[in-house]
Image: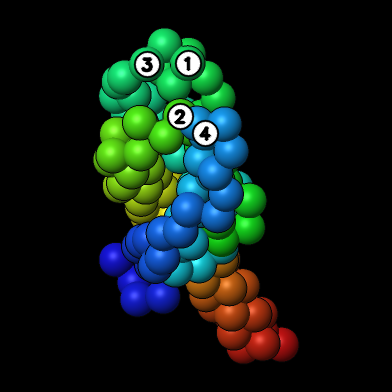
Amino acid sequence: MTEGYWTEISIRDRKVVSADGGRIEIHWTLTETPESAWQLAFNHDNSGKSGSIAYVMGPDATVAGDVIRWVIPEESLENANTVVNNKVAHANQRFRAVTEERVAEADRKSKAENATAEKIAEAQARLDKLS
């Protein structure tokens, strides 16, 4: 793949930012702000939440800017971290396919434009030779 089109996103930092009533809020900071296609892939991955019913049936992690936020039951911390790591890996895999297709489409378009320009130049050269 052409350099510059694909950058894997990873987790740069993890912090528990609040704790209240048996629930904690965790922020995972990403290495960059992902574009919407990456966020969709992250959101659509159903990586194995397991544990209490409140956790399994509760809201999922959300991506806002370069931060993944999730409020979870305290006892679900380890599973939540595993789930977020899996969702990031899945989003990277899916988004890489998207970016590769974008590059392929750009290459096809560029080749078509070059072929058209070449035909125009050839036709112009032929026309210029006529009296």
Marks 4 & 2, CB-CB < 8 Å contact: yes
Q: Is residue 73 above or below residue 64?
A: above
Query: Which comes before the other along the chain, label 3 or label 2?
Result: 3
**Mark 4 to mark 2 CA distance (whole Å):** 4 Å
Q: Residue furthest right?
A: 131
Mark seen at residue 52 = 3
- Secondary structure of the residue carrying tag 2 is strand
Q: Amino acid at mark 3?
A: Ser
**Mark 1 to mark 2 CA distance (whole Å):** 7 Å
Residue 15 visible at all: yes
Query: Which comes before the other along the chain, label 4 or label 2?
Result: 4
Q: Amino acid at mark 4?
A: Arg
Mark seen at residue 54 = 1
How far across and how far down the image is residue 91, in percent? Answer: 39, 44
Marks 3 & 2, CB-CB < 8 Å contact: yes
Residue 35 is drawn in which quadrant?
bottom right
Q: Which residue is mark 2?
A: 73
Marks 1 & 3, CB-CB < 8 Å contact: yes
- Secondary structure of the residue carrying tag 4 is strand
User: Could you say which is closer to the camera, residue 122 or residue 127?
Assistant: 122
Q: Amino acid at mark 2?
A: Pro
Q: Which residue is mark 4?
A: 23
| Mark 1 nearby-residue class (10 Å; few <14, some 14–19, many ≥20) | few
Marks 4 & 1, CB-CB < 8 Å contact: no
**Mark 1 to mark 3 CA distance (whole Å):** 5 Å
| Horizontal relation, residue 49 to residue 43: left or right | left
User: Could you say which is closer to the camera, residue 104 or residue 55?
Assistant: 55
Residue at image location 58% in from the left, 73% down from the top: 117
